[in-house]
Image (cartoon, rainbow, N blue to C red):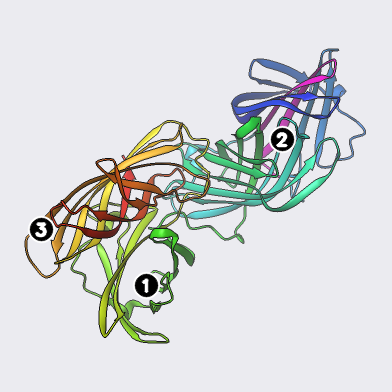
Amino acid sequence: MNDAASATVALDLTTKTGLSGSSSGSTLTISYDAKSQGYTVSVDGRSQTFTPADIKADSTNAQTETLYQKTDGTNRDYLTLVKVPFTSTQATQYVGLGFWQRNVVTGTRQDTNYATFTYGLPSDAAAVPRTGTAAFRIDAFGFVSKPGQEPLSFQGQGTFSVDFAAGVFSAQTYNTETGLVTGHGIVGGGIDLIAAGHLTSGNGFSGNALYEGQYGSAGGTLNGRFYGPTAQELGASFNGQGTDGFAVAGSFTGQRDTSATVANLTLTNLTQPQLFYTQFGYGLVGQLNQQNAETFTYSPPTSDLNGGQFTLADKVASSKANFTTYRKTFTGSFESQDVTLELYKPGAQNSELALTYASFGHWATKTRFGVGTAPVDQYFAYGLSTPARLLSGKTGTGHYAGVVYGTAAATAARYDVKGSSQFDVDFSKQSYSGALAMTGTPTNGGTAVDFGSFDFAGKLGYSATSTANITRSGVAVGQISPQFYGPDGEEIAGPFSLQSPANSAAGYATITGVAAAKRQ
Protein backbone atom coordinates (compact mmCIF):
# COMPACT_ATOMS: atom_id res chain seq x y z
CA MET A 1 0.00 0.00 0.00
CA ASN A 2 1.17 3.51 -0.79
CA ASP A 3 0.25 6.99 0.38
CA ALA A 4 -2.03 8.58 -2.20
CA ALA A 5 -4.57 11.35 -2.77
CA SER A 6 -7.22 11.55 -5.47
CA ALA A 7 -9.17 14.31 -7.20
CA THR A 8 -12.29 13.73 -9.28
CA VAL A 9 -13.22 16.65 -11.51
CA ALA A 10 -15.45 17.46 -14.46
CA LEU A 11 -14.23 19.93 -17.10
CA ASP A 12 -16.05 21.90 -19.79
CA LEU A 13 -13.95 21.48 -22.95
CA THR A 14 -15.61 24.46 -24.63
CA THR A 15 -14.71 27.00 -21.95
CA LYS A 16 -11.77 24.92 -20.69
CA THR A 17 -12.85 25.47 -17.10
CA GLY A 18 -13.97 23.27 -14.23
CA LEU A 19 -17.57 22.17 -13.67
CA SER A 20 -17.20 20.33 -10.35
CA GLY A 21 -14.52 18.74 -8.21
CA SER A 22 -13.73 16.83 -5.04
CA SER A 23 -10.65 15.31 -3.43
CA SER A 24 -9.87 12.70 -0.80
CA GLY A 25 -7.13 10.54 0.64
CA SER A 26 -6.80 7.18 -1.12
CA THR A 27 -5.23 3.76 -0.76
CA LEU A 28 -3.22 2.96 -3.88
CA THR A 29 -1.17 -0.04 -4.91
CA ILE A 30 1.55 -0.04 -7.53
CA SER A 31 3.35 -3.25 -8.47
CA TYR A 32 6.19 -3.95 -10.89
CA ASP A 33 6.43 -7.12 -13.00
CA ALA A 34 10.08 -7.80 -13.87
CA LYS A 35 9.23 -10.10 -16.76
CA SER A 36 7.04 -7.59 -18.64
CA GLN A 37 8.77 -4.54 -17.11
CA GLY A 38 5.28 -3.22 -16.53
CA TYR A 39 3.61 -1.31 -13.69
CA THR A 40 0.09 -2.04 -12.51
CA VAL A 41 -1.64 0.76 -10.61
CA SER A 42 -4.91 0.31 -8.69
CA VAL A 43 -6.85 2.95 -6.78
CA ASP A 44 -10.48 3.76 -5.96
CA GLY A 45 -11.83 0.71 -7.79
CA ARG A 46 -9.96 1.23 -11.06
CA SER A 47 -6.80 -0.46 -12.33
CA GLN A 48 -4.43 -0.18 -15.29
CA THR A 49 -1.20 -1.81 -16.42
CA PHE A 50 1.50 0.17 -18.24
CA THR A 51 4.36 -1.49 -20.14
CA PRO A 52 7.39 -0.15 -22.04
CA ALA A 53 5.26 -0.16 -25.19
CA ASP A 54 3.17 2.63 -23.61
CA ILE A 55 6.12 4.95 -22.95
CA LYS A 56 5.85 8.26 -24.75
CA ALA A 57 9.16 8.31 -26.59
CA ASP A 58 9.18 12.03 -27.44
CA SER A 59 8.71 13.24 -23.89
CA THR A 60 10.58 16.52 -23.36
CA ASN A 61 11.38 15.54 -19.76
CA ALA A 62 12.64 12.01 -20.39
CA GLN A 63 15.71 12.60 -18.23
CA THR A 64 13.65 13.45 -15.15
CA GLU A 65 10.44 11.42 -15.61
CA THR A 66 8.91 8.49 -17.48
CA LEU A 67 5.56 9.20 -19.11
CA TYR A 68 3.20 6.39 -20.14
CA GLN A 69 0.14 6.89 -22.39
CA LYS A 70 -2.59 4.34 -23.03
CA THR A 71 -6.14 4.37 -24.42
CA ASP A 72 -8.83 1.77 -25.04
CA GLY A 73 -11.10 4.13 -26.96
CA THR A 74 -12.97 5.26 -23.86
CA ASN A 75 -10.37 5.70 -21.13
CA ARG A 76 -7.32 7.81 -21.84
CA ASP A 77 -4.70 6.98 -19.21
CA TYR A 78 -1.50 8.85 -18.41
CA LEU A 79 1.02 7.61 -15.82
CA THR A 80 4.03 9.71 -14.85
CA LEU A 81 6.84 8.33 -12.68
CA VAL A 82 9.20 11.05 -11.52
CA LYS A 83 12.92 10.26 -11.55
CA VAL A 84 14.23 13.63 -10.34
CA PRO A 85 12.00 15.94 -8.25
CA PHE A 86 10.66 18.79 -10.37
CA THR A 87 12.30 21.52 -8.32
CA SER A 88 15.58 19.69 -7.68
CA THR A 89 18.52 18.28 -9.60
CA GLN A 90 19.22 15.34 -7.29
CA ALA A 91 17.36 12.07 -7.84
CA THR A 92 15.88 10.29 -4.85
CA GLN A 93 17.24 6.80 -4.11
CA TYR A 94 14.51 5.10 -2.09
CA VAL A 95 11.26 6.99 -2.75
CA GLY A 96 9.49 8.00 -5.93
CA LEU A 97 6.57 10.25 -6.84
CA GLY A 98 3.98 9.32 -9.41
CA PHE A 99 0.60 10.44 -10.70
CA TRP A 100 -2.01 8.67 -12.80
CA GLN A 101 -4.62 10.61 -14.74
CA ARG A 102 -7.60 9.00 -16.47
CA ASN A 103 -9.69 11.15 -18.84
CA VAL A 104 -13.09 10.17 -20.24
CA VAL A 105 -14.49 12.53 -22.87
CA THR A 106 -18.21 12.70 -23.66
CA GLY A 107 -19.14 15.46 -26.07
CA THR A 108 -17.83 18.72 -24.61
CA ARG A 109 -17.35 17.26 -21.13
CA GLN A 110 -14.22 15.61 -19.74
CA ASP A 111 -14.32 13.60 -16.52
CA THR A 112 -10.87 13.29 -14.95
CA ASN A 113 -9.72 11.01 -12.18
CA TYR A 114 -6.34 12.14 -10.88
CA ALA A 115 -4.36 10.08 -8.36
CA THR A 116 -1.01 11.21 -6.96
CA PHE A 117 1.17 8.93 -4.84
CA THR A 118 4.58 8.15 -3.38
CA TYR A 119 6.14 4.70 -3.40
CA GLY A 120 9.46 2.92 -2.96
CA LEU A 121 11.46 1.10 -0.29
CA PRO A 122 9.98 2.13 3.07
CA SER A 123 12.07 2.15 6.22
CA ASP A 124 11.68 -0.53 8.85
CA ALA A 125 10.01 0.82 11.99
CA ALA A 126 13.20 0.11 13.93
CA ALA A 127 15.18 2.27 11.49
CA VAL A 128 13.17 5.42 12.24
CA PRO A 129 14.96 7.48 14.92
CA ARG A 130 13.14 8.07 18.21
CA THR A 131 15.45 10.80 19.47
CA GLY A 132 16.79 14.04 18.04
CA THR A 133 15.52 16.28 15.26
CA ALA A 134 16.03 16.48 11.49
CA ALA A 135 15.14 18.55 8.45
CA PHE A 136 14.32 17.32 4.95
CA ARG A 137 14.26 19.31 1.71
CA ILE A 138 10.97 18.44 0.04
CA ASP A 139 9.60 18.85 -3.49
CA ALA A 140 5.83 19.01 -4.03
CA PHE A 141 3.67 18.51 -7.11
CA GLY A 142 -0.09 18.38 -7.57
CA PHE A 143 -3.36 19.35 -9.21
CA VAL A 144 -5.89 22.12 -8.44
CA SER A 145 -9.41 22.61 -9.80
CA LYS A 146 -12.32 24.94 -9.16
CA PRO A 147 -15.64 25.31 -11.00
CA GLY A 148 -15.51 28.15 -13.49
CA GLN A 149 -11.72 28.32 -13.41
CA GLU A 150 -8.88 26.90 -15.45
CA PRO A 151 -7.38 23.74 -13.87
CA LEU A 152 -3.87 24.20 -12.52
CA SER A 153 -0.81 22.21 -11.67
CA PHE A 154 1.54 23.31 -8.92
CA GLN A 155 5.08 22.52 -7.90
CA GLY A 156 7.33 23.86 -5.20
CA GLN A 157 10.10 23.28 -2.72
CA GLY A 158 10.27 23.60 1.04
CA THR A 159 11.27 22.04 4.34
CA PHE A 160 9.94 19.18 6.45
CA SER A 161 10.99 19.43 10.12
CA VAL A 162 10.64 16.54 12.55
CA ASP A 163 11.20 16.13 16.27
CA PHE A 164 11.62 12.36 16.58
CA ALA A 165 11.56 12.38 20.38
CA ALA A 166 8.26 14.27 20.56
CA GLY A 167 6.89 12.45 17.51
CA VAL A 168 5.75 15.60 15.68
CA PHE A 169 6.45 17.25 12.32
CA SER A 170 5.71 20.35 10.30
CA ALA A 171 6.15 21.06 6.60
CA GLN A 172 5.85 24.01 4.25
CA THR A 173 6.48 24.46 0.53
CA TYR A 174 6.34 27.60 -1.58
CA ASN A 175 4.75 26.84 -4.92
CA THR A 176 4.32 27.96 -8.50
CA GLU A 177 0.89 27.46 -10.08
CA THR A 178 0.62 26.86 -13.84
CA GLY A 179 -2.53 26.87 -15.95
CA LEU A 180 -3.03 23.53 -17.72
CA VAL A 181 -4.75 25.25 -20.64
CA THR A 182 -2.99 28.59 -21.06
CA GLY A 183 0.37 27.64 -19.54
CA HIS A 184 0.35 30.87 -17.57
CA GLY A 185 2.29 30.66 -14.32
CA ILE A 186 1.95 32.53 -11.06
CA VAL A 187 4.29 32.59 -8.07
CA GLY A 188 4.46 34.69 -4.94
CA GLY A 189 3.49 34.96 -1.32
CA GLY A 190 0.47 32.99 -0.23
CA ILE A 191 0.88 30.11 -2.73
CA ASP A 192 1.99 27.40 -0.36
CA LEU A 193 1.37 24.10 1.32
CA ILE A 194 1.35 23.95 5.12
CA ALA A 195 1.15 20.66 7.01
CA ALA A 196 1.73 19.38 10.54
CA GLY A 197 1.00 16.27 12.56
CA HIS A 198 2.37 13.27 14.40
CA LEU A 199 4.60 10.27 13.70
CA THR A 200 3.20 6.77 14.05
CA SER A 201 4.81 3.98 16.05
CA GLY A 202 5.95 2.46 12.73
CA ASN A 203 7.51 4.28 9.78
CA GLY A 204 4.63 6.65 9.02
CA PHE A 205 3.31 10.10 9.83
CA SER A 206 -0.06 11.80 9.34
CA GLY A 207 -1.73 15.08 10.07
CA ASN A 208 -3.48 18.14 8.73
CA ALA A 209 -2.75 19.88 5.44
CA LEU A 210 -3.66 23.31 4.08
CA TYR A 211 -3.15 24.35 0.47
CA GLU A 212 -3.32 28.09 -0.33
CA GLY A 213 -3.30 29.46 -3.86
CA GLN A 214 -4.88 31.91 -6.24
CA TYR A 215 -8.27 30.16 -5.97
CA GLY A 216 -8.39 30.29 -2.17
CA SER A 217 -7.53 27.79 0.55
CA ALA A 218 -8.36 24.10 0.92
CA GLY A 219 -7.96 22.16 4.17
CA GLY A 220 -7.55 18.41 4.37
CA THR A 221 -5.29 15.60 5.49
CA LEU A 222 -1.80 14.26 4.82
CA ASN A 223 -0.32 10.76 5.09
CA GLY A 224 3.29 9.71 4.51
CA ARG A 225 6.19 7.57 5.61
CA PHE A 226 9.98 7.39 5.76
CA TYR A 227 12.04 5.53 3.14
CA GLY A 228 15.53 4.06 3.04
CA PRO A 229 17.58 1.92 5.45
CA THR A 230 18.11 4.83 7.88
CA ALA A 231 14.99 6.90 7.13
CA GLN A 232 17.01 9.31 5.02
CA GLU A 233 14.12 10.02 2.63
CA LEU A 234 10.38 10.49 2.93
CA GLY A 235 7.23 10.72 0.83
CA ALA A 236 3.66 11.88 1.49
CA SER A 237 0.39 12.67 -0.24
CA PHE A 238 -2.21 15.23 0.75
CA ASN A 239 -5.67 16.42 -0.25
CA GLY A 240 -7.77 19.48 0.44
CA GLN A 241 -11.32 20.67 -0.08
CA GLY A 242 -12.27 24.34 -0.08
CA THR A 243 -15.44 26.28 -0.70
CA ASP A 244 -17.32 26.34 -4.03
CA GLY A 245 -15.88 23.02 -5.24
CA PHE A 246 -12.22 24.02 -4.85
CA ALA A 247 -10.22 20.75 -4.71
CA VAL A 248 -6.52 19.91 -4.50
CA ALA A 249 -4.49 16.70 -4.51
CA GLY A 250 -0.71 16.49 -4.32
CA SER A 251 2.38 14.67 -3.09
CA PHE A 252 5.92 15.45 -2.05
CA THR A 253 9.17 13.57 -1.63
CA GLY A 254 12.10 14.64 0.50
CA GLN A 255 15.74 13.97 1.30
CA ARG A 256 17.43 14.62 4.62
CA ASP A 257 19.42 17.87 4.57
CA THR A 258 21.85 18.55 7.39
CA SER A 259 22.31 22.15 6.21
CA ALA A 260 18.63 23.03 6.65
CA THR A 261 17.33 24.62 9.86
CA VAL A 262 14.93 22.48 11.87
CA ALA A 263 11.86 24.42 13.00
CA ASN A 264 11.00 24.48 16.70
CA LEU A 265 8.11 22.08 17.23
CA THR A 266 7.67 21.98 21.05
CA LEU A 267 8.27 24.43 23.89
CA THR A 268 10.08 21.67 25.77
CA ASN A 269 12.75 21.30 23.08
CA LEU A 270 13.55 24.67 21.53
CA THR A 271 16.62 23.99 19.40
CA GLN A 272 16.69 27.39 17.67
CA PRO A 273 16.03 31.00 18.75
CA GLN A 274 12.29 31.68 18.53
CA LEU A 275 10.28 34.88 18.20
CA PHE A 276 6.88 34.54 19.88
CA TYR A 277 4.08 37.02 19.26
CA THR A 278 2.35 37.40 22.61
CA GLN A 279 -1.45 37.69 22.36
CA PHE A 280 -3.20 40.12 24.70
CA GLY A 281 -6.86 41.06 24.89
CA TYR A 282 -8.47 43.48 22.44
CA GLY A 283 -6.10 42.47 19.65
CA LEU A 284 -2.95 43.82 21.30
CA VAL A 285 0.28 42.01 20.41
CA GLY A 286 3.70 42.04 22.06
CA GLN A 287 6.88 40.05 21.47
CA LEU A 288 8.93 37.54 23.42
CA ASN A 289 12.16 36.86 21.57
CA GLN A 290 13.65 33.66 23.02
CA GLN A 291 17.41 33.71 22.39
CA ASN A 292 18.26 30.64 24.48
CA ALA A 293 16.90 28.78 27.51
CA GLU A 294 17.71 31.62 29.93
CA THR A 295 17.92 34.73 27.75
CA PHE A 296 15.11 36.62 26.01
CA THR A 297 13.81 40.07 25.26
CA TYR A 298 10.26 41.11 25.99
CA SER A 299 8.35 43.93 24.32
CA PRO A 300 5.00 44.94 25.90
CA PRO A 301 2.08 45.70 23.59
CA THR A 302 1.73 49.41 24.41
CA SER A 303 4.22 52.29 24.46
CA ASP A 304 3.48 53.27 28.08
CA LEU A 305 5.06 50.04 29.33
CA ASN A 306 8.82 49.49 29.39
CA GLY A 307 10.47 46.21 28.38
CA GLY A 308 13.80 44.83 27.31
CA GLN A 309 16.37 42.12 27.97
CA PHE A 310 15.95 39.38 30.59
CA THR A 311 18.75 37.05 31.63
CA LEU A 312 19.36 34.38 34.24
CA ALA A 313 20.42 37.16 36.64
CA ASP A 314 16.86 38.54 36.62
CA LYS A 315 15.27 35.27 37.75
CA VAL A 316 13.93 35.25 41.31
CA ALA A 317 12.28 32.70 43.58
CA SER A 318 8.63 32.37 42.66
CA SER A 319 5.73 32.20 45.10
CA LYS A 320 3.90 30.09 42.50
CA ALA A 321 5.36 26.63 41.97
CA ASN A 322 4.36 26.36 38.31
CA PHE A 323 5.73 29.74 37.22
CA THR A 324 9.20 31.05 36.47
CA THR A 325 9.46 34.61 37.80
CA TYR A 326 11.69 37.51 36.70
CA ARG A 327 12.07 40.97 38.22
CA LYS A 328 13.80 43.94 36.68
CA THR A 329 13.66 47.74 36.49
CA PHE A 330 13.34 49.28 33.03
CA THR A 331 13.76 52.96 32.25
CA GLY A 332 11.76 54.43 29.40
CA SER A 333 11.29 57.89 27.94
CA PHE A 334 9.10 59.14 30.80
CA GLU A 335 9.66 56.96 33.84
CA SER A 336 11.29 53.92 35.39
CA GLN A 337 9.12 50.87 36.04
CA ASP A 338 9.72 47.95 38.37
CA VAL A 339 8.49 44.92 36.44
CA THR A 340 7.56 41.40 37.48
CA LEU A 341 7.20 38.87 34.68
CA GLU A 342 5.74 35.42 35.40
CA LEU A 343 5.91 32.69 32.74
CA TYR A 344 3.94 29.46 33.07
CA LYS A 345 6.29 26.47 33.00
CA PRO A 346 5.87 24.07 30.06
CA GLY A 347 6.12 20.29 30.12
CA ALA A 348 6.60 17.83 32.96
CA GLN A 349 8.07 20.47 35.29
CA ASN A 350 4.53 21.83 35.66
CA SER A 351 2.52 19.86 38.24
CA GLU A 352 -0.78 21.56 37.37
CA LEU A 353 -1.10 21.45 33.57
CA ALA A 354 1.72 19.99 31.45
CA LEU A 355 1.50 21.99 28.21
CA THR A 356 3.74 21.16 25.26
CA TYR A 357 2.95 23.84 22.69
CA ALA A 358 1.20 26.72 24.50
CA SER A 359 2.02 28.86 27.49
CA PHE A 360 1.10 32.21 29.00
CA GLY A 361 2.47 34.96 31.12
CA HIS A 362 1.64 37.79 33.53
CA TRP A 363 3.29 41.21 33.24
CA ALA A 364 2.91 43.34 36.38
CA THR A 365 4.13 46.88 37.04
CA LYS A 366 2.93 50.33 38.12
CA THR A 367 2.55 53.41 35.95
CA ARG A 368 1.95 57.06 36.70
CA PHE A 369 -1.66 57.96 37.39
CA GLY A 370 -2.34 61.56 38.35
CA VAL A 371 -0.07 62.40 41.27
CA GLY A 372 0.45 58.73 42.16
CA THR A 373 0.78 55.38 40.49
CA ALA A 374 -1.65 52.69 39.38
CA PRO A 375 -1.06 48.94 39.20
CA VAL A 376 -0.96 47.33 35.77
CA ASP A 377 -1.58 43.59 35.29
CA GLN A 378 -1.48 42.25 31.75
CA TYR A 379 -1.95 38.60 30.76
CA PHE A 380 -0.89 37.10 27.48
CA ALA A 381 -0.76 33.77 25.63
CA TYR A 382 2.10 32.61 23.44
CA GLY A 383 3.67 29.49 22.00
CA LEU A 384 3.89 27.42 18.82
CA SER A 385 0.52 28.25 17.37
CA THR A 386 -1.37 26.09 14.91
CA PRO A 387 -1.23 27.88 11.52
CA ALA A 388 -4.43 29.73 10.65
CA ARG A 389 -6.99 27.51 8.82
CA LEU A 390 -4.80 24.40 9.10
CA LEU A 391 -7.67 22.72 10.95
CA SER A 392 -10.31 23.86 8.45
CA GLY A 393 -10.51 20.35 6.98
CA LYS A 394 -10.52 18.57 10.35
CA THR A 395 -13.65 16.71 11.45
CA GLY A 396 -14.93 15.39 14.76
CA THR A 397 -14.95 17.04 18.17
CA GLY A 398 -12.51 17.79 20.96
CA HIS A 399 -12.88 18.52 24.68
CA TYR A 400 -10.23 20.66 26.36
CA ALA A 401 -9.73 21.26 30.08
CA GLY A 402 -7.31 23.57 31.85
CA VAL A 403 -6.70 26.60 34.03
CA VAL A 404 -7.46 30.30 34.41
CA TYR A 405 -5.20 32.97 35.90
CA GLY A 406 -5.98 36.65 36.21
CA THR A 407 -6.51 39.78 38.25
CA ALA A 408 -9.79 41.34 39.40
CA ALA A 409 -10.12 44.98 40.27
CA ALA A 410 -13.19 45.87 42.36
CA THR A 411 -14.17 49.06 44.13
CA ALA A 412 -12.92 47.95 47.53
CA ALA A 413 -10.25 45.38 46.73
CA ARG A 414 -7.94 43.80 44.21
CA TYR A 415 -7.87 40.01 43.75
CA ASP A 416 -5.56 37.33 42.43
CA VAL A 417 -7.83 35.19 40.28
CA LYS A 418 -7.50 31.48 39.66
CA GLY A 419 -9.84 28.88 38.26
CA SER A 420 -10.62 26.34 35.57
CA SER A 421 -11.37 26.54 31.87
CA GLN A 422 -13.01 24.19 29.42
CA PHE A 423 -13.47 24.31 25.67
CA ASP A 424 -15.61 22.07 23.48
CA VAL A 425 -14.73 22.26 19.79
CA ASP A 426 -16.80 20.90 16.91
CA PHE A 427 -14.28 20.78 14.07
CA SER A 428 -16.90 19.58 11.59
CA LYS A 429 -18.94 22.75 12.22
CA GLN A 430 -15.83 24.89 12.85
CA SER A 431 -17.29 26.20 16.12
CA TYR A 432 -16.52 26.11 19.83
CA SER A 433 -18.05 26.79 23.23
CA GLY A 434 -16.79 26.75 26.78
CA ALA A 435 -16.78 28.14 30.30
CA LEU A 436 -14.53 29.85 32.83
CA ALA A 437 -14.99 29.27 36.58
CA MET A 438 -13.05 31.61 38.87
CA THR A 439 -12.33 32.47 42.47
CA GLY A 440 -10.43 35.47 43.80
CA THR A 441 -8.08 35.95 46.74
CA PRO A 442 -7.66 39.56 47.99
CA THR A 443 -4.09 40.76 47.40
CA ASN A 444 -4.06 42.50 50.79
CA GLY A 445 -5.41 39.50 52.65
CA GLY A 446 -8.93 38.47 53.48
CA THR A 447 -11.55 35.95 52.51
CA ALA A 448 -11.58 34.46 49.01
CA VAL A 449 -14.64 35.09 46.86
CA ASP A 450 -16.30 32.97 44.19
CA PHE A 451 -16.82 34.89 40.96
CA GLY A 452 -18.85 32.00 39.56
CA SER A 453 -18.92 30.67 36.01
CA PHE A 454 -19.01 32.46 32.67
CA ASP A 455 -19.88 31.00 29.27
CA PHE A 456 -18.73 31.71 25.74
CA ALA A 457 -19.27 30.40 22.20
CA GLY A 458 -17.82 31.32 18.81
CA LYS A 459 -16.77 30.31 15.33
CA LEU A 460 -13.31 29.26 14.19
CA GLY A 461 -12.34 32.09 11.89
CA TYR A 462 -10.08 33.00 9.00
CA SER A 463 -7.28 34.10 11.33
CA ALA A 464 -5.49 32.02 13.95
CA THR A 465 -7.28 33.84 16.78
CA SER A 466 -11.07 33.73 17.14
CA THR A 467 -12.87 36.16 19.45
CA ALA A 468 -16.10 35.25 21.26
CA ASN A 469 -18.40 37.05 23.68
CA ILE A 470 -18.32 35.96 27.31
CA THR A 471 -21.79 35.81 28.85
CA ARG A 472 -23.41 35.47 32.27
CA SER A 473 -27.07 34.40 32.21
CA GLY A 474 -27.22 35.21 28.50
CA VAL A 475 -25.88 38.76 28.90
CA ALA A 476 -22.56 39.67 27.24
CA VAL A 477 -20.04 40.79 29.87
CA GLY A 478 -16.69 40.48 28.06
CA GLN A 479 -14.58 38.77 25.39
CA ILE A 480 -12.13 35.90 25.06
CA SER A 481 -9.70 35.38 22.17
CA PRO A 482 -8.56 31.74 22.11
CA GLN A 483 -6.04 30.29 19.70
CA PHE A 484 -4.97 26.72 18.88
CA TYR A 485 -1.44 25.54 19.53
CA GLY A 486 0.35 22.41 18.33
CA PRO A 487 0.34 20.49 15.02
CA ASP A 488 -3.20 19.18 15.56
CA GLY A 489 -4.59 21.93 17.75
CA GLU A 490 -3.81 19.88 20.86
CA GLU A 491 -3.87 22.93 23.13
CA ILE A 492 -5.80 26.21 23.42
CA ALA A 493 -4.79 29.45 25.10
CA GLY A 494 -6.18 32.95 25.01
CA PRO A 495 -6.54 36.20 26.95
CA PHE A 496 -9.91 37.42 28.21
CA SER A 497 -11.47 40.44 29.87
CA LEU A 498 -14.89 40.76 31.50
CA GLN A 499 -17.01 42.78 33.88
CA SER A 500 -18.33 40.77 36.81
CA PRO A 501 -21.96 41.78 37.52
CA ALA A 502 -22.71 44.00 40.50
CA ASN A 503 -24.56 41.16 42.22
CA SER A 504 -21.51 38.85 42.18
CA ALA A 505 -19.63 37.91 45.35
CA ALA A 506 -17.11 40.75 45.02
CA GLY A 507 -19.54 43.20 43.52
CA TYR A 508 -18.87 44.93 40.22
CA ALA A 509 -15.32 43.99 39.19
CA THR A 510 -13.13 44.06 36.08
CA ILE A 511 -11.38 40.73 35.54
CA THR A 512 -8.51 40.35 33.06
CA GLY A 513 -6.65 37.13 32.60
CA VAL A 514 -5.75 34.20 30.41
CA ALA A 515 -7.13 30.69 29.96
CA ALA A 516 -5.14 27.65 28.80
CA ALA A 517 -6.41 24.13 28.20
CA LYS A 518 -5.31 20.78 26.82
CA ARG A 519 -7.30 18.29 24.75
CA GLN A 520 -8.41 15.37 26.87
**For this view, does 265 lie left or right of residue 470?**
right
Q: Main secondary structure of the magenta part?
A: strand
Magenta stretch: give its range.
92-117
Q: Give the residue displayed 68% in from the left and 26% down from the top.
A: 21
Q: CA distance from mark 2 to mark 1?
A: 46 Å
- Label 1 is placed on what type of residue? Glu
**For this view, does 226 lie left or right of residue 451?**
right
**For this view, does 72 lie left or right of residue 460?**
right
Looking at the picture, how far across and down is residue 134, in whole percent?
Answer: 53, 54
Determine which of the numbered discs, if any, sits on residue 143 in the image.
2
**Mark nearer the N terminus (2 vs 1):** 2
Looking at the rendered structure, the secondary structure element under dot 3 is loop
- Label 2 is placed on what type of residue? Phe
**Mark nearer the N terminus (3 vs 2):** 2
Indicate the quadrant containing the N terminus: top left, top right, bottom left or bottom right: top right
Indicate the quadrant containing the C terminus: top left, top right, bottom left or bottom right: top left
212 and 300: which one is in front? 300
Looking at the picture, how far across and down is residue 122, in whole percent?
Answer: 58, 36
Determine which of the numbered discs, if any, sits on residue 294 in the image.
1
Q: Give the residue displayed 76% in from the left and 37% down from the top.
A: 152
Looking at the rendered structure, the secondary structure element under dot 1 is loop
112 within the magenta span: yes
Return the residue at label 3: 448
Badge 3 density bin: few <14, some 14–19, many ≥20, Cα 10 Å:
some
The answer to the question of whether label 3 and label 2 lie on touching residues, with beta carbons closer than 8 A, is no
Which mark lies nearer to you, 3 or 1?
3
- Label 3 is placed on what type of residue? Ala
